[in-house]
Image (tube, helix red, strand yellow):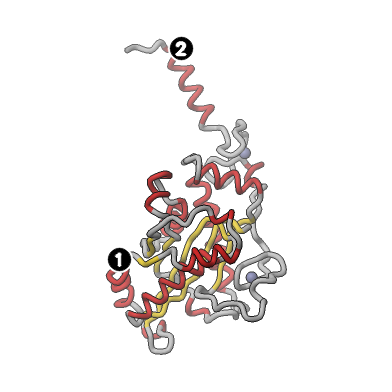
């Protein structure tokens, strides 16, 4: 079917115009930022977490949770979050996660990668003394899994897309180490205690984890040993940090399973937004 030159011109113009609109605000962008498809105005509004006040959970304000006496042992070394969970971030994550707007994938992946670079910078500083610095040398990137049901509904795991982007950008291996046998329902409607209870049994390790870990154990160096055990460092990625109970549950099963193989896991967490 032939197209008249005028129609072709019009379609070209339309396509070009489409590629010039900002994925977030939809306006014709005069200037694009360093983030894929994002105008500079939207980019300037990204609510980065700059000043970390709680070295454990990465909170930018005073943290009543981590200083609470009698708080449970943490299975991960610490968490860092790229941004605060502002209405804008909620909208972006919602577009990506629930409305399947794929354009947000690369953008949010880049936001995550920026936070990963900040983490590297922070932990390379000799003033960083809240954990053994030699532990911070990521071997494997992994993510919080979603249940089969969610995966069928959404067609993808948002945390995995973010984790894979970090892995790709930093030439690190991404491995699915965890599975989520059942759906735990919407966490946001539950109390903190209810969340903790459902979370504690929500995850298990991937049936093939032992094999996946083996090649890392083989290449592990003696100076990476902690108390005569091989040490492997994991970067655990999630989209939203609320209470940390999801990360805690994931880190616990990973560490317990690795211990059975004589491997010490140092788990560092990175989340996209913290509420
Ligand atoms: Zn914009
Ligand atoms: Zn904290």
Q: Position of residue 68 (x, y in %)?
A: 67, 77
Q: CA distance from mark 1 to mark 2?
A: 58 Å
Q: Position of residue 163 (x, y in %)?
A: 45, 57
Which residue is outermost to the right? 62
Which residue is outermost to the bottom? 228
Mark 2 or mark 1, which is nearer the start of the sequence? 2
| Residue for point 61% across, 40% down | 39
**Quadrant in the rendering for residue 118:** bottom right
Up/down of 251 relative to 150, above or below: below
Does the beta carbon at disc 1 come under 8 Å from ligand 2?
no
Q: Which residue is mark 1?
A: 207
Q: Is residue 160 left or right of residue 122?
A: left
Rate crowding at label 2 as few (under 14), some (14 to 19) or many (20 or more) other CA atoms within 10 Å: few
Indicate the quadrant containing the C terminus: top left, top right, bottom left or bottom right. bottom right
Q: Position of residue 31 (x, y in %)?
A: 61, 38
Q: Which residue is mark 2?
A: 6
Give whichever of 107, 260 is nearer the camera: 260
Q: Tell me which image quadrant ligand 1 sits in.
A: top right
Give whichever of 42, 150 is nearer the camera: 150
Up/down of 149 relative to 37, above or below: below
Does the beta carbon at disc 2 come under 8 Å from ligand 1?
no
Q: Element at badge 2?
A: helix
Q: Position of residue 254 (x, y in %)?
A: 41, 71
| Residue for point 30% across, 66% down | 207
């Amino acid at each position: 079917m032939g197209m008249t030159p005028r129609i072709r011109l019009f379609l070209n113009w339309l396509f070009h115009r489409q590629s010039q609109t900002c994925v977030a605000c939809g306006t014709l962008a005069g200037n694009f930022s360093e983030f894929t498809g994002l105008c500079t105005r939207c980019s300037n509004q990204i609510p980065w977490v700059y000043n970390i006040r709680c070295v454990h959970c990465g909170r930018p304000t005073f943290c009543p949770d981590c200083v609470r006496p009698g708080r449970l042992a943490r299975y991960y070394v610490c968490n860092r979050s790229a941004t605060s969970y502002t209405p804008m971030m909620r909208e972006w994550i919602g577009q990506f996660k629930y409305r399947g707007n794929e354009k947000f994938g690369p953008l949010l992946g880049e936001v995550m990668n920026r936070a990963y670079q900040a983490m590297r910078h922070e932990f390379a500083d000799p003033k960083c003394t809240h954990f053994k610095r030699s532990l911070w040398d990521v071997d494997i990137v992994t993510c919080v899994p979603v249940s089969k049901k969610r995966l069928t509904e959404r067609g993808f795991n948002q945390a995995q897309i973010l984790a894979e982007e970090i892995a790709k950008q930093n030439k690190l291996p991404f491995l699915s180490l965890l599975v989520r046998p059942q759906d735990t329902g919407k966490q946001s409607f539950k109390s903190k205690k209810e969340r903790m209870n459902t979370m504690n049994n929500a995850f298990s390790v991937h049936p093939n984890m032992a094999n996946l870990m083996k090649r890392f154990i083989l290449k592990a160096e003696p100076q990476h040993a902690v108390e005569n055990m091989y040490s492997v460092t994991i970067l655990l990625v999630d989209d939203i940090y609320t209470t940390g109970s999801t990360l805690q549950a994931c880190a616990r099963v990973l560490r317990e399973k690795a211990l059975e193989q004589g491997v010490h896991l140092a788990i560092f967490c990175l989340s996209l937004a913290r509420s």
